Amino acid sequence: MARSRTESAMLYAVVIAVIIVLIFPLYWMFNTSLAPSTQLRRFPPVFIQPEPTVAAYQQIFAERPIGLWLRNSAAVALSSTALSMFVSVLAGYSISRIRARGSQAVGLFFLMSRMLPSTLIIIPLFVSFRQLQLIGDLKSLVLAHATFITPFAVWMLKGYFDTIPAELEDAAMIDGCNPLSALLRVVLPLSAPGLAATTLYGFVLSWNDYVFARTFLVANQKAWTVNVGVASLKGEYLTEWNEIMAGSLIAMLPIVLAYLFLERFLVSGLTAGSSK
Amino acid sequence: MTSQASGRGERLGAAAPRWSLWNPANRSLFAYLLLLPAVVLTAAIIVYPILSAIDLSFQRIKIAKLGRSRAPWTLRNYEELFQSPEFLQAIWVTITLVAAVTLLSYIIGLGTAVLVNQRFAGRRAARVLVAVPWAVPSVMAAVIWWWLFDSSFGLINWALVRSGLSSQMIPWLSTQGAAFFVIVVVMVWKGYPFISVIMLAGLQSIPLELYDAAKVDGANGWNRFRFITLPGLRSVRGIALILIMLWVFRDFPIIYILTGGGPQNSTQTLAIMTYQEAFKFHDFGYAAAIGVITLIISVIASWFMVRRSDQPIY
């Protein structure tokens, strides 16, 4: 598989060109966030800031409650992920290990629920939450996000539990564990990487939500998540693009970092069942 | 050690077998107990809402009356829907958007996957960089591209005018056709990495010996791609395509933030129409009817996906 020098040089040229084109929007976001306001309405555009400034970051933090939005997003993501993980670990284990009548149907239901259109489910949820007076309350989001985290987590976890040999639990039970403590003491520690990945992805799913957060929280600015906040900047500021880009960059940073850890897990999870 | 011994001793020593959840005969009961919390939770936040959405879709009901009284059952919402040009347009927009985004994401995704599957120094970094847009939340993707396509100071307009491709600044998001194009670009940018990473996993599962053997037999690059790579990807391709189609079909934030479905409904998909009827026009019964139709389409598509996987589900 040896390549000639021209071939290698061409390969590198193509790889670099493709990456530049695909990543350019992110570079442009970063570049704009470091620009002084005076530069935003002038042509030609500046591709490399001669004097980068963090003024936009200071401005956006001073003018808008970004810290509060980030805290709200994190609180909702942690709570809905915790709730979903609790029920999903038990359900995923049950579906993975025990062939009980009807549990196959339950598993299929979770699989199909992953494809539920949020624009449909939001209508009856809005009606129910209004009756329960949860509109404007972060609790409404915790429940709403569980609608899409739980089905995903059940299947991701079932996949990890499938990879752990049942002999290990049998051995633990011979040693006096009951099935529940075999799950807690043997299976869960062994599936720690899978649990961590599923938890992190649940967090990402919740953090990325826009439709539920916008609909349930729009009237209560104190409860806004960072996505609702950032999307609102665009309407208000219109041309202060350096601040909008600075805010967006902060809001997406945790998620981009999470993906660096998650990619491997997600690929194996998504292609499981199809590649064999 | 002592606890193990005594545990076993108890079990062996019991004269009359006491009822125990841990008894293998009660394995099914144990399975149901483990499922119970998830079933209760999803019954409350998924099953009940779906049923009440179906119920709503058969009522003429506006937001003010919701939850206080119920209207009599009627098929009016569905009748109105199938006669509405707006609904037919939304179906058309949905189909063209799904087709365009899926096709372009597939081409770019497969291309980048093949590219970063080559052996070269720095390949790991290239793989991460190619996949990065996947990680960008939809809201941020929409906002970034909004700025790039900005009608007065956006980089794309500047580049088009500067290069002579356009004689004037294009008001992208307020022009029919142009707005649709912008939505396609943003979705492809966010969607291709997904295809790319799945295809890369598929490529890595193709044995290298096949390529070596084909080379010995004198197959050129295109034929190796055509007769080894493409068939080797068949199993992952189906899942990747269905997942991306369902994503475009159901997406809300990108379209809502960029155009809200406009101008003149030219970017209004069924998902956006459902939302707008409910939360802009407060016509919950009508919105629920559109939503129920999107649900049926999603269920059919995901059913195909479930059936496609070679392995049984268990």
Image (cartoon, coloured by chain):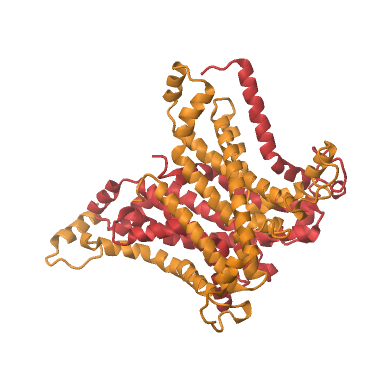
Query: For residue B158, what is the image quadrant?
Result: top right
* Residue situated furthest front in the rendering: B83
Q: Which chain is orange?
A: B
Q: Residue at x 57, y 40 (%)?
A: B106
Report whether residue B256 is seen. Answer: yes
Does B244 sit left or right of B28 as displayed? right
Residue A212 drawn above or below residue B285: above
Does A182 sit left or right of B247 as displayed? left
Q: Residue at x 44, y 16 (%)?
A: B216
- List x then y, in percent, for residue A154: 43, 56
Shown colour of chain A: red
Q: Residue at x 56, y 36 (%)?
A: B110
Q: Residue at x 51, y 40 (%)?
A: B198
- List x then y, in percent, for residue A165: 31, 45
Query: For residue B108, what is the image quadrant?
Result: top right
* Residue situated furthest left in the rendering: B15
The one nearer the camera, A250 or A162, is: A162
